Image (cartoon, coloured by chain):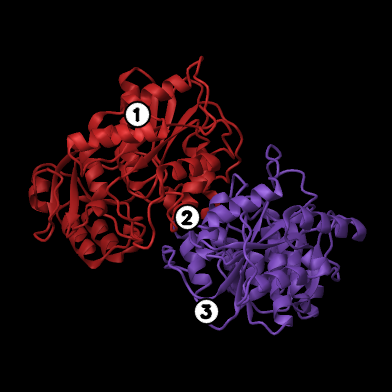
Chain colours: A purple, B red
Amino acid sequence: MIPGPYLLYLGHSDDEVGIKTSRGLAAFQRDACVGEWRHDDCPLTLGLPRMSVAEARQAGARTLVLGIANAGGRLGDDLIDDALLAISAGMNVASGLHQRLRDEPRLVAAATAVGVQLFDVRDPPVDLPVGNGKPRAGRRLLTVGTDCSVGKMYATLCLRDAMRARGIRADFRATGQTGILIAGDGIPLDAVVADFIAGAIEMLSPARDDDGWDLIEGQGSLFHPSFAGVSTGLLHGAQPDAIVMCHDPSRAHMRGLPHYQLPELKECLDANLRVARLTSPAVRATGIALNTVKLDDVAARRLCDQTADALGLPCTDPYRFGADPIVDWTLQCFAPSAPAMTASR
Amino acid sequence: MIPGPYLLYLGHSDDEVGIKTSRGLAAFQRDACVGEWRHDDCPLTLGLPRMSVAEARQAGARTLVLGIANAGGRLGDDLIDDALLAISAGMNVASGLHQRLRDEPRLVAAATAVGVQLFDVRDPPVDLPVGNGKPRAGRRLLTVGTDCSVGKMYATLCLRDAMRARGIRADFRATGQTGILIAGDGIPLDAVVADFIAGAIEMLSPARDDDGWDLIEGQGSLFHPSFAGVSTGLLHGAQPDAIVMCHDPSRAHMRGLPHYQLPELKECLDANLRVARLTSPAVRATGIALNTVKLDDVAARRLCDQTADALGLPCTDPYRFGADPIVDWTLQCFAPSAPAMTASR
């Protein structure tokens, strides 16, 4: 386990989506975070006290979390220099980037000299199995998305918390670096070798017979040309009973690809159900989760209502308004006397 | 490059599909193969002279190709012992298994002592890009399948040869270990980290403006619960103008999964076109390739004719009857005055 409390790194970031790992920790593990470290050119904040490495150390921080992301996940010189500073102050360093801390000789040498640890949370387990698609016991809900970074992890965690608040056993199954840092374990799916994507999820979310739910964090989108393979294997390995589709209505185009438009919600839902049916023939969509952070309350509520009407499913911003509408319907759908499915879902 | 000629390994294999790498080399690089090495309990043959390591060495073999596969791609003790025997006779060893030769200390020590090389053809390039889905110039044809191991590589190579016989520039883009051994290069797609599947194919088959065709070897199947993520990323990265669907009519169930039936041909074709349209909106299916090895000539011809009628596309066994019907229609479809598309394809 990674020693807390954490200092969350923002560095020189000026892209809100790029700091999602730091923001996720601040949102769901706030008690474990002493502060944020950002340079003068960083216009973003998590609402935590701004601290230097020395101040954070004094406040008790034991690990610097490099909670920023970029396409390709590389360690730039600025990141390395800042990580060296934290190490020299006696802090461990954790990273979810593709490029590993342990592959950077300067970091390894410094950590060894000081006696601190480097944590690469994007290391998948060795000896993953190939997926087998065999039906397994238990209830599973998977979040899917119209795009990358639209709020799938937030929705999954909110659904878990709303289920737990009702006394239902519910476990969050993390598939990305932020989720793994929050949950303490999981499998970084985008770092798994392609042949083992589905098998990794079968391992992450095994059969359960305690009437509880596994809430599985989705990744990517079937409509993202870079990452749809990951989303497909995840759908097949998850063998979901229920899917909840996540969407960011402010997104102008697919993340990182200005030449790709977002899919229609209905089209995206249908595609996910179609792919999921290969391993889970009775899969149902049980809700839509919107990320309404850029809308005021009235506009956000109205959009949720309109979306619910248009798709015939409960729709909420689970982080802003709570996940109860989706949990209500999900539990109804899978109760002993469940409502019948409509033709399309 | 791997030094030829080769001794092809069958070992103790008793599963025809498991020896597909050795068989592929025997089929498409026969001149580079001096013989086959099989143990007494192996009922299979490639039709090459059966040889011991010593006999093969005497016949000029420079590399033992471990051309067998198993689910998970592990190196068993029997394979290691046999590879050690070849090394001690002065031969290099090449393997396409997931588990690397270089990770087995006994092989590394022996190869170093003797002064021969170990070739792991399942090593993808480092620094692969993330896919970007940007439209690129050139004509690309991708083979897709109802299942794994149904003849996609054979069909792709036959299509290439048939195009070349007409004077068309045509290049085979290998995505699996057998294809890579035959072509001399390529990317082992199933060993690529999940985030880079589509990007690997964009790199493998870059833009071309010489009126030639890239013939891209397909992998897996959208209907195989273990590997559909790979097939999805391949479809998106390939950005195919044309797809050719491959099928083995003798297959009783999905490879390795007795609890999964094969999809209907039409259903499979539609699903592939639907996924491909994300990056190649005008994609067309231009043929069906059957693997009829288990049928007699009359039954094979009849099945091709029936399939062509049922799907409204040319259908052939390209290895048995030639790929010309599919090449004819493909070239017609993409000629300056191409026939119009029907609604479904």
| Residue position marked by numbered label 2 in the rendering | A194
Marks 1 & 2 on one chain = no
For marks 3 and 2, give the CA distance. Answer: 26 Å
Residue A117: percent from left, percent from top: 60, 74
* Mark count: 3
Q: Amino acid at mark 1?
A: Arg
Position of the C terminus of chain A, as image quadrant, is bottom right
Judge whether residue B4 can be spotted in this image. Answer: no
Residue B70: percent from left, percent from top: 30, 59
In the rendered image, which quarter is residue B79 located in? bottom left
- Where A320 sits versus B56, above or below? below
Residue A65: percent from left, percent from top: 69, 68
Marks 3 & 2 on one chain = yes
Position of the N terminus of chain A, as image quadrant, is bottom right
For marks 1 and 2, give the CA distance. Answer: 27 Å
For marks 1 and 3, give the CA distance. Answer: 50 Å
Disc 3: host chain: A
Marks 1 & 3 on one chain = no
Question: Relative to the observer, which residue lies in front, B85 or B319?
Answer: B319
- Where A65 sits versus A193, above or below? below
Residue B92: percent from left, percent from top: 23, 50
At horizontal 73% and vertical 54% (from top left) the residue drawn is A311
Secondary structure of the residue carrying tag 1 is helix
| Residue position marked by numbered label 1 in the rendering | B160
Classify mark 2: residues with Cα within 10 Å, few (<14), some (14-19) or many (20+).
many
Q: Are marks 3 and 2 in contact (CB under 8 Å)?
A: no
Disc 1: host chain: B
Classify mark 1: residues with Cα within 10 Å, few (<14), some (14-19) or many (20+).
many
Q: Are marks 1 and 3 in contact (CB under 8 Å)?
A: no
Judge whether residue A31 can be spotted in this image. Answer: yes
| Residue position marked by numbered label 3 in the rendering | A208
